Image (cartoon, helix red, strand yellow):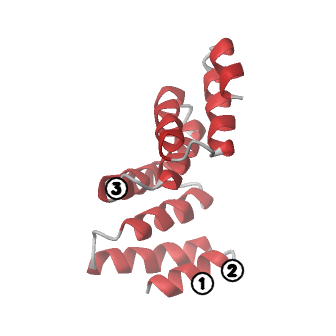
Amino acid sequence: MIGLGNCYYDTGKPDNAVKYYQMALEIDEQLSDVHYNLGNALYLIEKVDEAVKHYKRAIQINPKKPESFYNLGNALCVKADYESAIEAYTQAIDLDPKNAPAFYNLGNALYMLNKFNESVKAY
């Protein structure tokens, strides 16, 4: 099921991927990468609240994956929850100090909150 979800995701069919990732989680809810992948698919079909839920679950299971924090930050920015996005990007950077996109998006989130000096440092 995970393979089918990945195949659908990779071929631009995130709606179908969601179904297979959900089926995999019905069998084993502790699959961090499947929660992460499901979050990505949900994000693509603009179900951002659900994506946030799955990114957070992926982080609960595996708090050492910077990509989960980064994508959580992106989803939170779409929701205009910049404070929470800043926390997520900061966690991503703590785990991967060379994560240039996380620094850039951190700068954007800070900028949206009119924290211009801090945003310059992040950029």
Residue closer to the observer: 92 or 35: 92
Q: Nearer the viewer, residue 53 or 59?
A: 59
Instruction: Tell me which numbered mark, 3 or 1, is placed earlier along the sequence.
Output: 1
Please, what secondary structure does the residue beneath circle 1 have? helix
The amino acid marked with disc number 3 is Arg
Q: Residue at label 1?
A: 7
Q: Which residue is mark 2?
A: 11
Q: CA distance from mark 3 to mark 1?
A: 22 Å
Decide: few, some or many residues near mark 1? Use Cα within 10 Å; few <14, some 14-19, many ≥20: some
Amino acid carrying label 2: it is: Thr
Answer with mark 3 or mark 2, whichever residue precedes in sequence.
2
- Residue 43's x, y, as percent? 57, 56
Give me the residue at 54% from left, 29% from top.
Answer: 82
| Dot 2 crowding, Cα within 10 Å, few <14, some 14–19, many 20+ | few
- Residue at 33 percent across and 74 percent down: it is 25
Location of residue 109 (image quadrant): top right
Could you tell me if the residues under marks 1 and 2 are in contact, i.e. CB atoms within 8 Å?
A: yes
Mark 3 highlights which residue?
Answer: 57
> Height in image: 39 above or below 2?
above
Screen quadrant of the C terminus: top right
* Real-space CA distance between mark 1 and mark 2, rounded to the nearest whole angstrom: 6 Å
- Which residue shows up at 60% across the image and 18% down it? 113
